[in-house]
Amino acid sequence: MTAHAVSRRKTRGQSRDHARVLTWPFTVMVLLVAGAAVFVSYALWPTWPGEPMPLDAPAIPITVAGVLFDVPPAAIREAVQRVPGQQERVDLVFEWPSLTPPQPDEKAADKLALNADNAAAAAAATENERLFVTIAGLGAELPPLERLRTIYPRYIEAQASAGPAGLAILPFRAGTPYDSEDLLYLGANPEQFFARCTRPAGAVPGTCIQERALDTAQLTFRFPRDWLLVDWRNVAAGFDRLVTQLHPAAK
């Protein structure tokens, strides 16, 4: 065998070894990319929501903004939200002052259909007996107490009027983001209780919003303004009970 043949054989062997050295990193890279693609496809693949829970089912676990809540299905207003697991927001309604979910109102619907006048009156009465609650993530929005300390003072009038049982009523200035609203709060300690309320306008009653931060979630209560003027302390205590009912860890 000539030296030239030996040299060619060595060159071929070296080429094959060099090819193997280059192939392994490439193969590993391909496998990593394929694995990442499979994971991303699985994570982003759309899934169909589960069947809504029946109204008479026990409370179901729902996580909003990383906070766990126990929510009775009958209180959830939207059927698509009536499933356990992670959700962006949940819209609820409760009877007041019992704080129980409303009963199926098929019979009430039959009564409301008698005539338009009776229907409007009955609907208004029903609305006055219900508390609407939204649970959503706080996101980039300031917590309610921070808004009370830093945002609302920019838009309020200088003088508050006295309300019932220690409440103070402070109007927001016209032309501000809270035009036609009042800030109702405990005069001696505003941070203990406060709410934003629209003013009654003709036949339209005033309504109030109270917001409470719970870790990274926020609960928004919507209710008639008259409730505060009758007994705001009972309203505040009812909200406390409901928060504990929905989030037992808040005790």
Image (tube, rainbow, N blue to C red):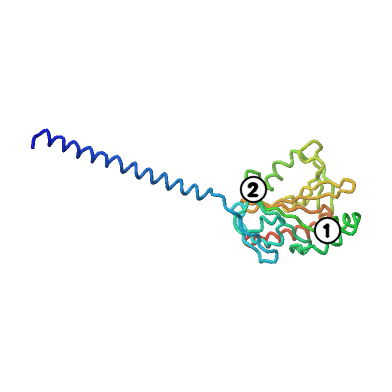
Percent x, y for residue 84?
61, 59
Percent x, y for residue 167?
81, 52
Q: Nearer the viewer, residue 126 or 194?
A: 126
Quick one: quadrant of the N terminus? top left
Corner quadrant of residue 4: top left
**Residue position for label 2:** 138
Q: Residue at x 88, y 54 (%)?
A: 120
Residue 191, labelled with which disc? none
Percent x, y for residue 212?
69, 52
Percent x, y for residue 200?
86, 47
Corner quadrant of residue 106: bottom right
Q: Is residue 237 left or right of residue 33?
A: right
Quick one: label 1 or label 2, which is nearer the N terminus?
1
The amino acid on which the numbered mark 2 sits, given as a three-letter code, is Leu
Corner quadrant of residue 214: bottom right
Q: Residue at x 87, y 58 (%)?
A: 113
Query: Number of labelled discs?
Result: 2
The amino acid on which the numbered mark 1 sits, given as a three-letter code, is Thr
**Residue position for label 1:** 126
